[in-house]
Amino acid sequence: MHYYRALQEYLRQGNGLYLTDWASMDNSPRNPYLVKGGTAVDTSAQMAMFADDLAAFAKVLGKNAEAAEFKHEFTELAAQINRLMWDPEKQFYFDLTWESARVPVKTVAGFWPLIAGVASPKQAAALAAELQNTNTFNRPHRVPTLAANQTGYDPSGGYWRGAVWAPTETMVIRGLQRYGQNQLAADIALNHLTSMGEVFARTGTVWENYAPETLAPGKPAKRDFVGWSAIGPMVYLLEFAIGLTPDAEANTLTWKLVSTQSCGCEHYRFNGHVVSLLAIPDGKNWNLRVQSDGAFELKVTSGVHAKTFAVKPGDNRFAISMPSH
């Protein structure tokens, strides 16, 4: 809470929105427009998300007055972002200059209102459409940090002039999921995972960022950069390729079987459990083996088929029909 209040004190401008600096996107074409006190859509949306999260924390702790206060701050900031930063003609969010003009540069920052819950359903649909626009953000390796039709776009990456970065990929994916755009989120995640795999096969390492137009490291990009780039071969692999989504609070693991081959994960950890899962197809059914050191609920989907199984400590065997083709 004190950190949030400090950011309000030092970064909030008179219009209620928030400053950023070059460190947000080091060499982005947006940066020259933000000098002297311009406000950024990503930082502003992040502060809205911060307020909303603090409201949730306060509610859990029984601090109802503080929960209401933070929720009110979220609502006010979200309204200001939508009033000043959303361009109804271009159907996108933009930074603001010191003079309160919308910055004429379309960057990945414009998707932050999704994960923050700031966008309306109609605005979210417009942002989802923009992510499928092959003239802007739907490039061979999705999603570039600068739209491809913008001045300064670098097809080889150019750091924040078009490169694909794991943190912004994840922001986009989680934002889409928040608004029910699950298939598009999965498409983007699997595109990134596959692209990373191709580059790894050629170079033998993981890179800081990636080129948006070719299956190559970004230029420039540091090699052996696990850091945030590990999000792809960890989170995207487990959640979107294997299909595992945990819910620790509900003690539930959802397994969406999307592969046509044997798949699973050994020593998967969630909610204090260590679980090994394996699904083997026999042509008609998925035969599941689940070994766990604790009890939980396993929700499995396979095409139109769905079943819920009670996993007990030890070795468990289940079956679910495969989709008919």
Image: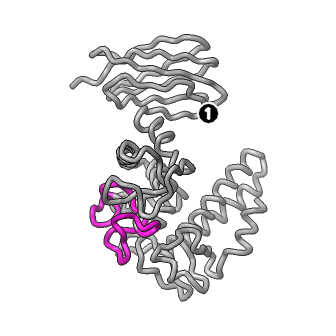
The furthest residue to the bottom: 99
Residue at 46% x, 54% y: name it: 169
Residue interval drawn in magenta: 132-161
Q: Is residue 140 magenta?
A: yes
x and y percentages locating residue 217 in the rendered image: 40, 56
Counting labels gives 1
Q: Name which residue type carries label 1.
A: Ala
> Can you identify the residue that label 1 sits on?
248
* 245 lies above or below 227: above
Residue at 60% x, 86% y: name it: 36
Badge 1: how crowded within 10 Å, few (<14), some, or many (20+)?
few
- In the depicted view, which residue is nearer to us: 322 or 232? 232
Q: Is residue 278 visible?
A: yes
Q: Is residue 130 magenta?
A: no
Q: Quadrant of residue 272?
A: top right
- In the depicted view, which residue is nearer to us: 303 or 7? 7
Mark 1 secondary-structure assignment: loop
Residue at 43% x, 33% y: name it: 243
